[in-house]
Amino acid sequence: MEDTIAAVATAYGEGGIGIIRLSGPDTLKIMSAIFKPARKESSFAAENRKLIYGTVEDPKNGKTIDEVLAVYMKAPYTYTREDVGEIHCHGSIISLRKTLELILCSGARLAEKGEFTKRAFLNGRLDLSQAEAVMDLIKADTDMGFDVALEQMEGSLSGKVRELRDSLVALLAHVAVNIDYPDEDIEEITYEDMIKSISVIGDEVDNMLAQAHTGRIVREGLRVTIAGKPNVGKSSLMNAMLREARAIVTDIPGTTRDTIEEGLSVRGIPLRLTDTAGIHFTEDQVEKLGIEKSKESFNKADLILLILDGSKEMEEEDLELMEKVAQKPVVVLVNKTDLALKLDLEEVKRKLPQAALIKTAVKEGKGLELLEDEIERMVFSGGARQKDSLLVTNVRHKNALEQTASALADAKEGCERREALDLVEIDLRRAWEFLGEITGETAAEDIIDQVFSRFCLGK
């Protein structure tokens, strides 16, 4: 924390502007050493938080490196709550490299991954869950993922966690008084009161955990596998959902010999869509490898889109596929319904009673809207996401909430068995500490280091 750190804050490659960021006690000294304002009366000290036009020059020989804009921001009203500076160069790798070299030679060191945000956390500007939301915001590839990350960065999750911790602190304080001063004239806490209070907190934790599956999908994407025998329309469906000719489509069965994976957004929900090779018996070694990869993708999928040919009667390969996917969330697409329907739909419903069934004619674009409705319904358990609903998107947060729920269950069970208050207090304190791991208040140093190691250098 005594060092001044620096790193390129923009993506590498050609661009209009490239930004180098500094943070630390020597920021003003370093920037003043290499930056020469175009107007002599300009200075960082006099024009705090204002962009100044000038040049970056090598202090050793006065050679101009680039024509830039620079800004100095005095602590504590900065991203890290330290002195922060930015130099806006032309978006050339050469310009950024040479300017960064001058900064490092003038006394700064290269920032570690996520060190700017780590300093913001250590200086109390962000808690740990807000810091993680910063990276989710950067990596978001759908509007919904961006909105959820922004809400968490603004403190929606932190606020809820602190509210639960405050409730636990109040309960712990009441328990502690009854343990330490049993003979004093104070309000005695009953086991019934404690069970009621623990249940209220536990219900809140359970509600957050109930949203964790949806949150994981919003953050990482819904893994969707398209399955079916050859030539039923799997590649056509993928092309229709992507709205581009990504997969080759022919009338020849077995055209797709390998899995094809693409990302897309359906009503703000990120999908990781996999088109598989048609599963059937074959002597072709290449097709066999593709079919094995198709079977592997079934196990990883959150959702199977099983396509059946509605213009043909049920075949043995269809039955085998239905048996294979019976234990997974499935949407059955009865394709080619623009032709005479020969498939026994009642038999499909008997084999997959829990699956949604949609009639489609993929090449004509029929049924796709119904499919999107069903995907949205499955992700949000029957309804669109409400604006005030809190999504838990991070696996670390989910694990901490599960441990909290377990500790609360132990405390409640102890109350029901009328155990000593000292034992109940231990479980309540465990729950309080697990919640604190989410915001970083009780997180171990190795957890904090692990979180920030996943960041990019300039953040």
Image (spheres, rainbow, N blue to C red):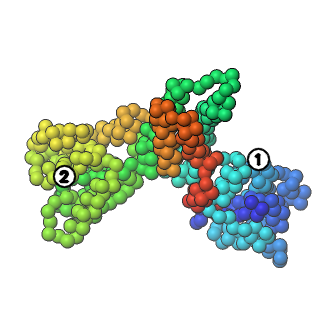
Q: Which type of secondary structure does the marked residue at label 1 adopt?
A: loop
Location of mark 1 (residue): 77
Query: Residue drawn 65% across and 29% down?
Result: 182
Q: Nearer the viewer, residue 308 or 212?
A: 212
Query: Residue drawn 66% across and 59% down?
Result: 115
The image quadrant that residue 355 belongs to is top left
What percent of the width, then of the height, locates residue 107? 79, 69
Q: Is residue 162 left or right of residue 204?
A: right
Q: Nearer the viewer, residue 189 or 111?
A: 189
Q: Is residue 280 left or right of residue 412?
A: left
Q: Is residue 120 left or right of residue 325?
A: right
Q: Nearer the viewer, residue 181 or 442?
A: 181
Q: Is residue 148 left or right of residue 367?
A: right
Query: Quarter holding the N terminus?
Result: bottom right
> Could you say which disc has been placed on residue 321 in the image?
2
How many C-alpha atoms fall within 10 Å of the one at disc 1: few (<14), some, or many (≥20)? few
Q: Nearer the viewer, residue 346 or 359?
A: 346
What percent of the width, then of the height, locates residue 159? 61, 37
What percent of the width, then of the height, locates residue 453? 58, 61
Q: Is residue 22 visible?
A: yes
What percent of the width, then of the height, locates residue 400? 52, 46
Q: Of label 2 and label 1, which has the lower sequence position? A: 1
Kind of residue at badge 2: Leu
> Could you say which disc has been placed on residue 186 in the image?
none
Query: Residue drawn 30% across and 55% down?
Result: 299
Q: Which type of secondary structure does the marked residue at label 2 adopt?
A: helix
Kind of residue at badge 1: Tyr
Query: Quarter holding the C terminus?
Result: bottom right
